Image (tube, helix red, strand yellow):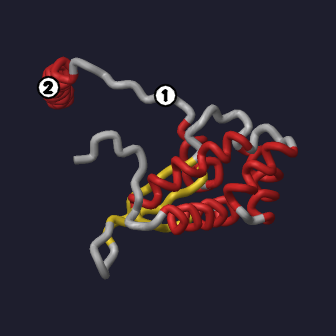
């Protein structure tokens, strides 16, 4: 049973898991999107989202705290300089997990984890919709009215033909 099991150990020792998540977080920050298994992506999301939140406050202390997690200067610089500006107004939910299918070798469920504000395709499609879609209720009334209008249209066509014959 999994009573009280807070984290997924991912079949690794604590040191290996820490190093793996650190490397994956740095790769995610630098490349904005990585492909991995769903279990690792969920563990990475819990690891990287607090770092993204901390990057909103650009102080020496927060930079050092994030560096202690990432251990990569380039990733810390990218996070505080570029990524923090894009996520400044977002209250949370900085990452998105998109499932992509199953791996051929071991049938592990694969996914893509990405930073939300960096997917240009999704940003372009959501920006163009603009109007809010609403549902209509009472579709039966519309069908009934449409069915009633069809015979009326047929009658008007018939009367129009009858008047042409009369002339």
- Looking at the image, which residue sits at the far right? 60
Placement of 83 over or under 26, stated as above or below: above
Which residue shows up at 33% across the image and 65% down it?
Answer: 109
Residue nearer the viewer, 136 or 26 = 26
Q: Position of residue 49 (x, y in %)?
A: 60, 45
Which numbered disc, 2 or 1, marks the residue that appears first in the sequence? 1
- For marks 2 and 1, give the CA distance: 29 Å
Whether residue 38 is visible: yes
SS class of the residue under badge 1? loop
Q: Residue at position x 64%, y 48% from top?
A: 117
Q: Residues within 10 Å of mark 1 (few under 14, many from 20)?
A: few
Q: How many marks?
A: 2
163 over 120 or under it: above or below: above
Residue 46, label in figure: none
Q: Secondary structure at mark 2?
A: helix
Q: Is residue 78 left or right of residue 112?
A: right
Query: In the figure, is residue 96 to the left or right of 77?
Result: left
State yes or no: discs 2 and 1 in contact (Cβ < 8 Å): no
What x and y, as percent, mark residue 65? 75, 48
Label 2 crowd (10 A; few <14 / some 14-19 / many >=20):
few
Position of the C terminus by quadrant: top left
- The residue lying at 28 percent from left, 41 percent from top is 3
Q: Residue 153 location, x and y as percent?
A: 19, 26
Find the residue positioned furthest to the bottom: 105
**Which is closer to the viewer, label 2 or label 1?**
1
Which residue: 61% across, 62% down?
Answer: 22
Name above or below for residue 22 compared with residue 146: below
According to the picture, the residue beneath numbered tag 2 turns out to be 147
The residue to which callout 1 is attached is 132
- Left or right: 111, with 51 as reference point: left
Asked whether residue 167 appears in the rendered view, the answer is: no
């Amino acid at each position: 049973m999994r009573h009280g099991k807070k984290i997924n150990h991912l079949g690794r020792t604590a040191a290996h898991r820490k190093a793996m998540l650190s490397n994956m977080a740095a790769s995610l920050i630098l490349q904005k999107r990585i492909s991995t298994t769903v279990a690792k992506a969920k563990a990475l999301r819990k690891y990287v989202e607090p770092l993204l939140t901390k990057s909103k406050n650009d102080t020496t202390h927060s930079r050092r705290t994030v560096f202690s997690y990432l251990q990569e200067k380039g990733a810390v610089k990218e996070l505080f300089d570029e990524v923090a500006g894009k996520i400044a107004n977002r209250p949370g939910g900085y990452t998105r997990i998109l499932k992509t299918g199953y791996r051929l070798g071991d049938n592990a469920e694969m996914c893509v984890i990405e930073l939300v504000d960096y997917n240009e395709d999704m940003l372009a499609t959501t920006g163009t919709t603009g109007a809010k879609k609403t549902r209509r209720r009472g579709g039966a009334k519309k069908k009934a009215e449409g069915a009633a209008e069809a015979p009326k249209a047929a009658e008007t066509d018939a009367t129009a033909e009858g008047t042409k014959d009369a002339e």
